[in-house]
Image: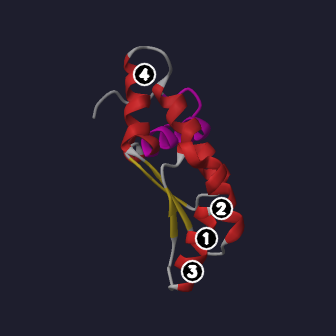
Amino acid sequence: REALRQVALDEAEGADMVMVKPAGAYLDILCRVRAATSLPVAAYQVSGEYAMIKAASANGWLNERDIVLESLTAIRRAGADVILTYFARDAARYLAEDAAQEIFPGLRASTST
């Protein structure tokens, strides 16, 4: 309820956009904010979310690429128009690789940086 009150205050003050953070932990709030406003809704995947994914990946507990794309998809599906994330470059690369695979099946991604 507090988040929705804050959105209403922000709108009344002339905000151009509202933001929800941390994005992953507040997907329910993000969804409610999206339903409550016509302003663009941003979501910030905070450094703690980034660190958890990096640590789990480093320990071999999950596939980093898959969980990054899954977490960003969840944030988008919850209602974010804009996502701020430390994974922005990685996500862009993953999506470009996926698009290239659709256009050129069997194409192998370059290993150079």
Left or right for 3, reference 86: right
Percent coordinates x, y for residue 25 in the rendering: 55, 43
Percent coordinates x, y for residue 56 in the rendering: 43, 21
Among the two numbered marks 1 and 3 on one chain, the one whose residue lies closer to the N terminus: 1
Residue 101 is covered by the magenta coloring: yes
Residues under labels 2 and 3: Cα distance?
Answer: 16 Å
Q: Which residue is mark 1?
A: 5
Residue 11 is marked as: 3
Amino acid on which disc 2 is placed: Arg
Residue closest to the far left = 113
Closest to the camera, between mark 1 and mark 3, is 1
Asked if the residues shown at circle 2 and circle 1 are in contact, with their CB atoms under 8 angstroms apart, the answer is: yes
Q: Is residue 63 above or below residue 3?
A: above
Residue closest to the far front = 2
Closest to the camera, between mark 2 and mark 3, is 2
Residues under labels 2 and 4: Cα distance?
Answer: 35 Å
Label 4 Cα neighbours within 10 Å, binned few <14 / some 14-19 / many ≥20: some
Among the two numbered marks 2 and 4 on one chain, the one whose residue lies closer to the N terminus: 2
Among the two numbered marks 4 and 1 on one chain, the one whose residue lies closer to the N terminus: 1
Left or right for 108, reference 35: left
Quadrant where the C terminus sits is: top left
- Res 74 → quadrant: top right
Asked if the residues shown at circle 4 and circle 1 are in contact, with their CB atoms under 8 angstroms apart, the answer is: no
Residue 93 is covered by the magenta coloring: yes
Task: Tell me where the magenta segment starts and ends, as one range.
Answer: 92-107
Question: For the residue labelled by badge 2, is the local secondary structure a helix, a strand or a loop?
Answer: loop
Question: For the residue labelled by badge 1, is the local secondary structure a helix, a strand or a loop?
Answer: helix
Residue 1 is marked as: 2
Residue 57 is marked as: 4
